Structures are given as structure tokens and as C-alpha cells.
Image (cartoon, grey):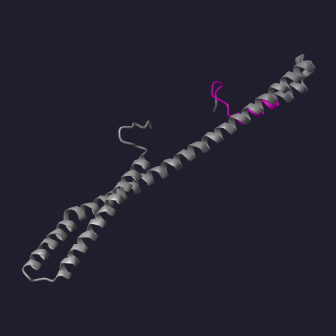
């Protein structure tokens, strides 16, 4: 049961004010109210109803804004996770070129050159080894570009630039 100090929901308050206005109208003579008093009561009731509608609209607008914010945050979180995954993959690929593929190709070319000097391999085989090394260097450069793009995507997704603090 509600007490006198409990807040009254807007709908009940508006209905109560409408009933109050109707009672004042019906009982105006008994209450000693004249036409001016009744007009003031009616105007106040209309103004309050309008204000209550504005409050309800503002609450609905705030709730919609909160929903939009939550959706934007969800999308931003997904974007950050995706960018982080892409960065990890790009780092792995670049590291494989730097630590494994290129050193092996360089060693192969060196061995082919020594083999050519010793007459064990042909010039075509040496040129093929050089071409393989050149291809791997190009692919490593592409992997480095992909790595930098992934870093930028992560920075954009987190709205973080080096040395810049973004308030949250």
C-alpha cells in the first residue's frame, strides 16, 4: 500500500488531476469557486498534462539513446577484437618470413652459388634460387605492409594514437 510520501506515477497523477478538475467544476458553488478559479484549475491541469507528456517523451528518447550507445559499444568491441585478431595473424606471418623463409632462401642461394662455382649446379638453378629469394623478399614486404595496416586498424578501433589519451 502506498503512503502519502510515496511518489505517484505520472499516469495516476494526471488521472487524479483530471478528476480533481471535474470535481471542482461540479462542486464549484459548494467550494466557492468562480469561473476564473475554474479556468486557472483547467489551465494548470492542461499544462501539467503537457509537461507529463514531455517528460515521457524525454524518457523514451533517453532510453533509445542508451540502446544506441550499447549497440555502438558492442560494435566497437567487435571491431577491436577483429582488429586484434588480424594484427596477431599479420605478426605471425611477418615473423615467419623474417625468421624462417628468408634465411633459408638466402642459405639456398649461397649454396647454389657455391655449387655453380664447383660445377655441380647450372646457372638456371642459381637464377631460380635468386628469383625465389626476390619473391620471398617481396612477400615479406607485403607482409610488413599488412602488419602496419593491421596496427592502424587496431589503433582506429580503439581510438588510441601513440601518445594521445582518449577519455572514456
Where residue 45 appears, as percent x and y from the top left, is: 80, 28
Residue in view at x 19 percent, y 70 percent: 105
Toward the top, the furthest residue is 32
Q: Write down the quadrant of residue 125 in the picture.
A: bottom left
The tally of labels here is 0
The extreme left residue here reads 118
Task: From the top left corner, tell me how far across and down residue 7 is, in percent.
Answer: 64, 29
Query: Is 124 displayed left or right of 49 in the figure?
Result: left
Quarter containing the N terminus:
top right
For residue 117, above or below residue 63: below
Q: Position of residue 70 (x, y in %)?
A: 52, 47
Residue displayed at 61% across by 45% down: 64
**Depth check: 39 or 63 in front?**
63
**What residue range appears in magenta?**
3-19
Q: Residue at x 90, y 19 (%)?
A: 36
Residue 78 is situated, as x and y percent measured from the top left of the image, at 44, 54
> In the rendered view, does 156 fall on the left or right side of 60?
left
Magenta-drawn stretch contains 97? no
Q: Based on the displayed image, in which of its 4 quarters is residue 111 positioned?
A: bottom left
Q: Is residue 8 shown in magenta?
A: yes
Amino acid at each position: 500500500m502506498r503512503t502519502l510520501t510515496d511518489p505517484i506515477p505520472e499516469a495516476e497523477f494526471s488521472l487524479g488531476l483530471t478528476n480533481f478538475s471535474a470535481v471542482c467544476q461540479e462542486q464549484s458553488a459548494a467550494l466557492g469557486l468562480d469561473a476564473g478559479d475554474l479556468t486557472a484549475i483547467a489551465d494548470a491541469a492542461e499544462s501539467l498534462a503537457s509537461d507529463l507528456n514531455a517528460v515521457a517523451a524525454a524518457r523514451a528518447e533517453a532510453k533509445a539513446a542508451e540502446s544506441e550507445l550499447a549497440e555502438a559499444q558492442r560494435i566497437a568491441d567487435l571491431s577491436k577484437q577483429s582488429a586484434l585478431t588480424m594484427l596477431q595473424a599479420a605478426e605471425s606471418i611477418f615473423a615467419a618470413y623474417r625468421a624462417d623463409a628468408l634465411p633459408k632462401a638466402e642459405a639456398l642461394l649461397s649454396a647454389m652459388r657455391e655449387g655453380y662455382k664447383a660445377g655441380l649446379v647450372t646457372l638456371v638453378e642459381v637464377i631460380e634460387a635468386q628469383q625465389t629469394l626476390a619473391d620471398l623478399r617481396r612477400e615479406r614486404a607485403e607482409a610488413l605492409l599488412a602488419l602496419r595496416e593491421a596496427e592502424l586498424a587496431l589503433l582506429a578501433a580503439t581510438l588510441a594514437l601513440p601518445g594521445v589519451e582518449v577519455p572514456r
